[in-house]
Amino acid sequence: MMFGTWLIDRGLVTPRNLLEALDRQRTRRVPIARIAIEQKMIGEAQVLQVLDQQAISDDRFGDVAVELGVLTAEQVGKLLGEQQRRCGRIGEVLVQMGVLDERTLNSELEAYQKHTKRAAPSALI
């Protein structure tokens, strides 16, 4: 179960709240190509090379960049982490929207983490 679904099930947010928060996250998403250029991992010519190949293969930018040897899998992982950080976690977005307060977010995160740790072993059986 995802954290947003957890919050809906607990009656703390509505499906509409969650969808709006997800839309806000999506609009903040910076392409990893731009982040890679900002962090000087690759240049514009390399980005264009990856985009040309991506248009043919329809694979994700990071996968194509690794395949072409332009980026390593580790670099792509770091770029995706930075991309996620810039988007904001769903709970942070809900707080910014005024749907949750920090205290409720923190207590629900703790409860959710305890729940998912308990649920994980049974999922393997």
Image (tube, rainbow, N blue to C red):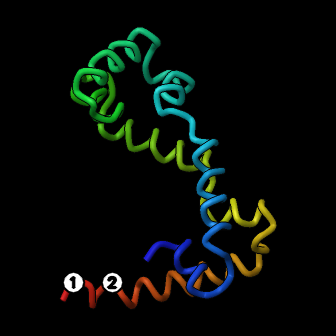
The image shows residue 7, relative to residue 88, as above or below, that is below
**Rounded to the nearest whole Å, what is the CA distance between mark 1 and mark 2?**
7 Å
The image shows residue 41, relative to residue 102, as above or below, that is above
- Quadrant of the drawing holding the N terminus: bottom left
Q: Position of residue 76 (x, y in %)?
A: 38, 38
In the image, 40 versus 19, the foreground residue is: 19
Q: Say which residue appears at 30% left-offset and 24% top-offset.
A: 54
Q: Position of residue 18 (x, y in %)?
A: 62, 66
Would you say 59 lies left or right of 10 here? left
Q: Say which residue appears at 61% left-offset and 50% top-offset.
A: 25
Q: Secondary structure at mark 1?
A: helix
Image quarter for residue 10?
bottom right
The image shows residue 76, relative to residue 13, as above or below, that is above
Q: Say which residue appears at 53% left-offset and 30% top-offset.
A: 35
Image quarter for residue 106?
bottom right
The amino acid pointed to by label 1 is Leu
Q: Secondary structure at mark 2?
A: helix
User: Among all residues in the image, which is located at the extreme left?
Assistant: 125
How many neighbours does mark 1 have within 10 angstroms: few (below 14), some (14-19), or many (20 or more)? few
How many neighbours does mark 2 have within 10 angstroms: few (below 14), some (14-19), or many (20 or more)? few
Residue where numbered disc 1 is placed: 124
Tell me, yes or no, whether the two marked residues, 1 and 2, touch with CB atoms within 8 Å.
Answer: yes
Q: Name the mark on residue 116.
A: none
Q: Say which residue appears at 27% left-offset and 28% top-offset.
A: 64
Would you say 33 lies left or right of 59 here? right
In the image, 119 versus 16, the foreground residue is: 16
Q: Position of residue 96 (x, y in %)?
A: 77, 60
Residue where numbered disc 2 is placed: 120
